[in-house]
Image (tube, rainbow, N blue to C red):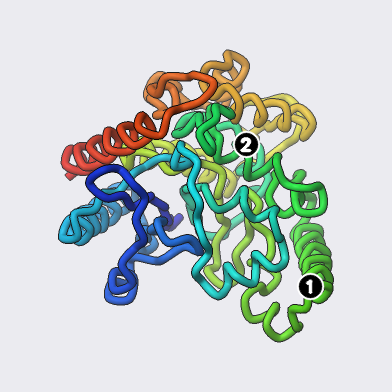
Amino acid sequence: MKIGLEVEYWLVDGDGELIAVPSELPADHDFLEEEFIPPLLEVLTPPASSHEELRTALVDRLEATLELVDEYGYRLVPLGSPLARESLSITSERGKVLQRIYGEELEYAKHCAGTHVHFDKAEVVRQLNLLTGLDPALALVNSSPYYSSSQVASSSRAAVYRYEAHREFARYRDLWDYVSDIEEWNARVEEHHRDLRRIAEEVGIDREQFERYFPPESSVFTPVRLREQSPTVEWRAPDTALPSQTLRLVEDVERLLAQTEYKEVAVGETGVWADRIGVPPFSELQELSREAISDGLRSLRVQDYLATMGFDVTRYDPIADRIERNWTIPRERALEIRLRFADELEADVERLS
């Protein structure tokens, strides 16, 4: 099973202030992409056939990226949010169209940095359902308890992205229920795409422009997506994190996902057996996911569930658990934490290399 990564990092200057990505970086390097806000930079790996190949690709690209941004005196920060309150403008054309559709609701997506993992499609329905059932595994790499200077959750990124939106838009960001077949999945996507197109037309976006930026599979931003163009099953649940922790999580998830080629994914009793992988009923899963987002590995229930699914939680050290928790965070402290984890990212890459 080939695996590809897209990992987002904040770009900061020597004082820890967010800084716009220089346009020539993504223009001149095909493994870098701009996001729809200026200080967010995405590092991409090509599809890898083994974990060692994936590790090498990510480390090589991170080393190159760190050298490139260092020429400007900039740093990369692996935090799920920038911690402090920031005023971030949208610069990409796709982002501007999205802002017209979502209006103020897009604010909750502008301060989020995550990890997107692409797995080759195989037993697609089983893959979709298992990745859905593994949503609480995001707790293993939660990386920011603060959003806009206030303590929100162990993963403030996931909390605001999924739960702060109006009901009309939350369905485009939150976890979807399990599916029985691929036709059911495609029908959901088509329904949501049709509804989003209607909203776009109501705010004056013509159909041609909408379809150019938002084909059906790109019109939803759920934690699990099916990508026909790649073609992959995409897992978007985790925060950005230190690369060693991200690689460990991807390896653990892929180890389970590979078993879907010869094991059923059954809803009910949870666990991994010789003939099946059991995931909890969706209502129970939603409770686990909320605890994983709000409390992370501080939740014994989440720890127990992940252990039942074969994860060794003692091998993880989430950044969020290493940041002190107060009701609010002073801006000066937020800048210090950004620089601290910029240091840790660089040290982590050096260890991996």
Q: Which of 313 and 296 is in front in this view?
A: 296
Q: Which quadrant of the view contains residue 320?
A: top left
Q: Which residue lies furthest to the top in this view?
A: 300
Three-letter amino acid code of the residue under disc 1: Val
Q: In this view, does 27 lie to the left or right of 270?
A: left
Whether label 1 touches label 2, CB < 8 Å? no
Residue topped by disc 1: 203
Residue plotted at (31% across, 67% down): 22
Q: Which residue lies furthest to the bottom in this view?
A: 208
Asked if residue 350 shows in the view, the reply is yes
The answer to whether 308 is drawn above or below residue 95 in the figure is above
Quarter that holds the C terminus: top left
Residue plotted at (43% across, 37% down): 249
Residue topped by disc 2: 159
Three-letter amino acid code of the residue under disc 2: Ala
Q: Mark 1 falls on what kind of element? A: loop
Residue plotted at (30% across, 48% down): 76
Quarter that holds the N terminus: bottom left
Distance from Cα at disc 1 to Cα at disc 2 = 27 Å
